[in-house]
Image (cartoon, rainbow, N blue to C red):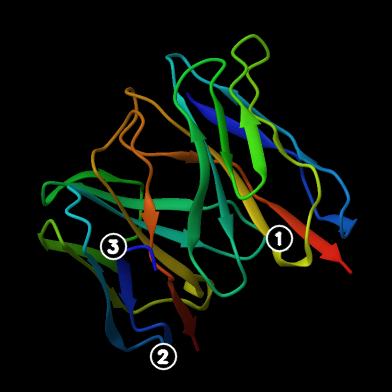
Amino acid sequence: ETGVTQTPRHLVMGMTNKKSLKCEQHLGHNAMYWYKQSAKKPLELMFVYNFKEQTENNSVPSRFSPECPNSSHLFLHLHTLQPEDSALYLCASSQGLAGSYEQYFGPGTRLTVT
Amino acid sequence: GDSVTQMEGPVTLSEEAFLTINCTYTATGYPSLFWYVQYPGEGLQLLLKATKADDKGSNKGFEATYRKETTSFHLEKGSVQVSDSAVYFCALSDHNNNDMRFGAGTRLTVKP
C-alpha cells in the first residue's frame, strides 16, 4: 500500500465511449502525475500537476483530458480512444516536482479499448 | 536532456545467484538517483535511492552506489530469491526537470 489509490483497476471500453480514471493520494503531496505504460515501451509521462496547476503536457492527444480539482485528486477523462491506447495507466504523486523527491505510484488501471 | 540507460533484459538467474543490473545516466546538474521495482499486476514501488555522489542506497538486500565519475548507479544483490522476480527501473530526478526520467526497465526472473 503506497498511499495512492486508483479506480477502476480494470476498464474495457469501446472507441465511442466516454470514461474517467480516478486517482487519489493520501500522502499530503503537492504534485501528481499520469503515466502510460505499454508493453515493450518505456514508461511515458503524460501530464504533471503541481498545486493543482498543470505544469507539463507531454504532447498527449486531446482524447485524453486531465483534471486536478485539488492536490489529492487527479482524473483522466477518456473519449473516442483508439485500440493503441490500450495500456496500463499509472498515477503517481510526490512531495515536490524535482530534486530528491521520490514518486509514489498507484497500482494502475489496466485499460482495454475494443 | 537528462536520460537514463539501463541494461536490456530479460535477465534469468537461479535462486541465490548474484545480481547486477547496470544503469548509467546523463544529466546536466546533480541528480538524485532511484531504483524502482514493479511486481506483476502492480504499480512501481521505490526500492532505494541516493541523492549525492558516493551515497549508497540499500533496501531488502539490494544496494546501489551513486558513482559520479562513471555516471552509474548499478543495482546489486548478493543472493536473489524467487520473490525478487519483477521489472526493475532506474530513474533520475534533478532540479532542471518537472518530472522523473525512467529507464526502459529490466525484467528479472529468478528460478528455484
Q: Nearer the viewer, mark 3 or mark 1?
A: 1
Q: How many marks?
A: 3
The answer to which of A63 and B110 lies nearer the viewer is B110
Helix, strand or loop for disc 2: loop
The quadrant where residue B86 appears: bottom right
Percent coordinates x, y for residue B70 in the rendering: 68, 14
Report the residue at 15% width, 61% height from top. A72
CB under 8 Å between callouts 3 and 1? no
* Image side of residue A28 versus residue B107, left or right: left
Helix, strand or loop for disc 3: loop
Label 3 Cα crowd, 10 Å radius (few <14 / some 14-19 / many 20+): few
Of all chains, the one bearing label 1 is: B
Of all chains, the one bearing label 2 is: A
Helix, strand or loop for disc 1: helix
Is residue A86 depicted above or below B89 in this figure? below
User: Residue at the top extreme?
Assistant: B69
Q: Are marks 2 and 1 on the same chain?
A: no
Q: Amino acid at mark 3?
A: Ser
Report the residue at 11% width, 47% height from top. A51
- Alpha carbon separation for disc pair 3 and 1: 39 Å
* Image side of residue A99 versus residue B102, left or right: left
Question: Which residue carries the number 3 mark?
Answer: A62
The answer to which of B87 and A36 lies nearer the viewer is B87
Question: Which residue carries the number 1 mark?
Answer: B84
Report the residue at 88% width, 56% height from top. B13
